[in-house]
Image (spheres, rainbow, N blue to C red):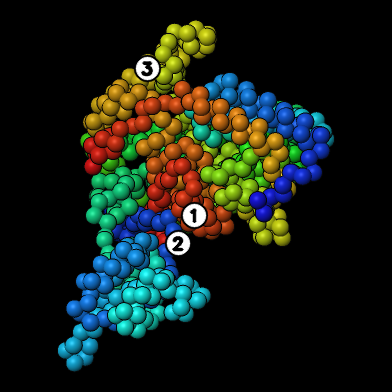
């Protein structure tokens, strides 16, 4: 029959386009502060003066005492400028100038004294306020006044890039999240996957439950159950490093569908739960205006924690709590089985995961875990992820109207919070094209 | 606090409801939880109470406000209310909470469409009603289209704040014996590199 060759041909195409897809997909770090164009970096005014070379040492030593540039450590005190005729001109920063009053009379008495005794003629100039974070920024800064630049020499959780193995596994987990979001034919919702990156294991997964689709009460549950089964079935695709080797990326048509039909995504339309079509709530009580995918995934990982570690170790006497809990003793049995499953899984995966469960005991919230979201979370979900101590957030699509991790708010840069995660966007080829 | 009103029009009702919220916070304290409590009031009647349960549930999002909201949603769904009826109910409810709602809770309150919030002390680290963000003001977009960042709600700060602070103080003095010590060793993350 002619069917076979056609499907082979299609497979070949898919493989080819996936290769292209891989090379055109990337993981982008979403920084804590809004990036500014290199030539529009914030500046501050300083007083400077041209000085004779032989005075430099004395002046710098004295100025470092009376007017240290404390918040401008990246700024060089001295500027050497090559003039056209082979001569060099040396200038140095005297002190900070106020933004409004650039009158020389505002100089502090000590600096004023120095200016007078060395007969310096002070002038106002601009220097960049913050240290450069990229080479481009640094080159631009030096046009104003020389600064020093220290490129990051170590990799904080992928901020300066991911290696090939990590990249593959990040793409793989995001692919899983997209599958989950799309696994209902009725509507597209957000999906969340909490992952322990040290063993490349899915800890919890959930979809939006803020509204109910027509046959929601069954479909939502089924969807996730079948997804869990599916997850198990694909676990054989993880190679010895735990990375996903079957390596399919979402097709561009799937990505298009997702983007076009996102009106049911909780984080994008958080008030839509009010206007959902009337349903007989007696038969379905699965909608909840706040049960966005991330919130539901957090609850799922918390319940896994309670199931795997039913007693709080720090409370000492386990038997008391178990007795007190009465009918929950079954949980202990289940826990045993789960732990065995987990252990055998770990053996299969072949990573050094012993410490995760045996040495350090139960996890503390989601410390060390990553979360994969199809859409950038809203502010409620983003803050929930701070509370639950997630280590890294990956999302595929930005959320222009309510996104809290770069689009509308930038919660990861909120200094007052007691926990900070790193945020990345997994950009598939559809957006690059 | 310039964005949230301060509690000058403290009627005895307001104080009475806040006293009930403090009672909830004390229950949390007794259970070795961070002492925050709240009550939700409809037509002058307390219809839900909530207290922090983050340690017990190992879910750091189980704040007092979320607990109380969940009680109501569950009850109203059991009564067969539709989503618009639930929304209508929330729009008549006032929340009394001992500490300024965090960014997450403030957003949640705006999503469910609460009418009004009274709180005790400010929350300098996480506050979503004036301290860090001002989500109670809603967004310009939402005021015109009704479907923006979130609806705003009236917010009154400083009701019985010193009582709320005193509870925090005794919590931190007694320590948090439930705080689990096993922060995952960093070694784990480096192993698989």
> Marks 3 and 2: same chain?
yes
Q: Residue at 42% across / 35% down in the picture?
A: A366
> Marks 2 and 1: same chain?
yes
For the C terminus of chain A, the quadrant is: bottom left
Disc 3 target residue:
A337
Report the disc number at residue A410. Answer: 1
**Mark nearer the N terminus (3 vs 2):** 2
As measured in the structure, the alpha-carbon distance from the residue carrying label 2 to the one carrying label 1 is: 8 Å
Residue A70 picture quarter: bottom left
x and y, in percent, of residue A231 in the image: 39, 34
Residue nearest the viewer, comparing A72 with A118: A118
**Mark nearer the N terminus (1 vs 3):** 3
Secondary structure at badge 2 equals loop
Residue A391 picture quarter: top left
Disc 2 target residue:
A34
Q: Residue at 38% across / 64% down in the picture?
A: A130
Q: Can residue A157 be seen in this view?
A: yes
> Subunit of mark 3?
A
**Mark nearer the N terminus (2 vs 1):** 2
| B138 lies above or below A218 | below
Label 1 crowd (10 A; few <14 / some 14-19 / many >=20):
some
Label 2 crowd (10 A; few <14 / some 14-19 / many >=20):
few
| A295 lies above or below A248 | above
As measured in the structure, the alpha-carbon distance from the residue carrying label 1 to the one carrying label 3 is: 42 Å
x and y, in percent, of residue B114 in the image: 71, 43
Of circles 3 and 2, which is in front?
A: 2
x and y, in percent, of residue B78 in the image: 71, 27
Q: Can residue A259 be seen in this view?
A: no
């Amino acid at each position: 029959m002619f069917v076979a060759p056609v499907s082979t041909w299609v497979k070949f195409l898919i493989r080819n386009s996936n290769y292209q897809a891989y090379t055109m997909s990337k993981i982008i770090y979403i920084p804590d502060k809004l990036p500014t164009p290199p030539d529009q970096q914030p500046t501050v005014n300083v007083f400077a003066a041209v000085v004779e070379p032989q005075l430099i040492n004395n002046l710098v030593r004295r100025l470092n005492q009376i007017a240290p540039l404390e918040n401008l450590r990246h700024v060089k005190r001295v500027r050497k400028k090559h003039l056209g005729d082979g001569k060099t001109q040396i200038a140095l920063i005297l002190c900070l100038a106020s933004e409004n009053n650039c009158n020389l009379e505002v100089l502090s008495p000590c600096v004023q004294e120095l200016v007078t005794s060395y007969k310096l003629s002070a002038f106002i100039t601009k220097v960049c306020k913050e240290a450069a974070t990229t080479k481009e920024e640094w080159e631009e800064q030096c046009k104003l006044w020389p600064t020093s630049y220290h490129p990051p020499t170590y990799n904080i959780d992928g901020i300066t890039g991911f290696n090939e193995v990590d990249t593959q596994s990040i793409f793989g987990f995001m692919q899983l999240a997209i599958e989950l979001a799309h696994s209902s034919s009725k509507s597209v919702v957000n999906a969340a996957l909490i992952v322990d990156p040290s063993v490349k294991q899915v800890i919890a997964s959930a979809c939006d439950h803020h509204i109910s689709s027509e046959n929601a009460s069954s479909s939502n549950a089924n969807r996730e159950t079948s997804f869990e089964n599916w997850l198990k079935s694909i676990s054989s695709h993880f190679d010895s490093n735990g990375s996903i080797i079957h390596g399919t990326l979402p097709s561009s048509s799937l990505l298009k569908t997702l983007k076009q039909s996102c009106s049911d995504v909780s984080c994008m339309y958080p008030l839509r739960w009010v206007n959902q079509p009337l349903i007989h709530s007696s038969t379905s009580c699965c909608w909840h205006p706040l049960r966005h995918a991330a919130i539901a995934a957090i609850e799922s990982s918390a319940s896994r924690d309670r199931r795997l570690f039913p007693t709080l170790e720090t409370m000492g006497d386990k038997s008391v709590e178990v007795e007190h809990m009465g009918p929950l003793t079954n949980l202990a049995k289940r826990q045993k089985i789960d732990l065995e499953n987990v252990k055998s899984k770990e053996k299969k995966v072949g990573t050094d995961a012993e410490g995760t469960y045996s040495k350090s005991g139960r996890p503390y919230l989601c410390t060390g875990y990553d979360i994969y979201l199809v859409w950038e979370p809203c502010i409620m979900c983003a803050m929930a992820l701070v509370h639950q101590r997630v280590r890294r957030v990956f999302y595929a699509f930005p959320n222009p109207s309510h996104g809290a991790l770069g689009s509308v708010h930038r919660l990861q840069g909120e200094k007052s919070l007691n926990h900070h995660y790193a945020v990345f966007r997994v950009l598939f080829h559809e957006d690059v094209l | 606090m310039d964005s949230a009103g301060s509690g000058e029009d403290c009627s005895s009702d307001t104080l009475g409801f806040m006293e009930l919220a403090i009672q909830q916070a004390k229950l949390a304290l007794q259970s070795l939880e961070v002492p925050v409590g709240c009550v939700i009031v409809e037509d002058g009647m307390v219809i839900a109470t909530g207290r922090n349960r983050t340690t017990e549930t190992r879910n750091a999002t189980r704040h007092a406000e979320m607990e109380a909201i969940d009680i109501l949603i569950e009850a109203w769904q059991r009564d067969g209310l539709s989503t618009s009826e639930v929304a209508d109910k929330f729009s008549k409810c006032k929340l009394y909470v001992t500490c300024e709602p965090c960014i997450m809770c403030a957003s949640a309150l705006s999503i469910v469409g609460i009418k009004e919030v009274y709180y005790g002390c400010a929350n300098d680290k996480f506050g979503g009603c004036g301290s860090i963000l001002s989500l109670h003001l809603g967004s310009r977009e939402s005021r015109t289209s009704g479907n923006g960042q979130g609806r705003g709600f009236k917010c009154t700060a400083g009701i019985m704040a010193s009582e709320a602070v005193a509870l925090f103080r005794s919590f931190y003095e007694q320590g948090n014996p439930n705080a689990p010590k096993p922060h995952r060793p960093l070694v784990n993350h480096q192993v698989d590199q």
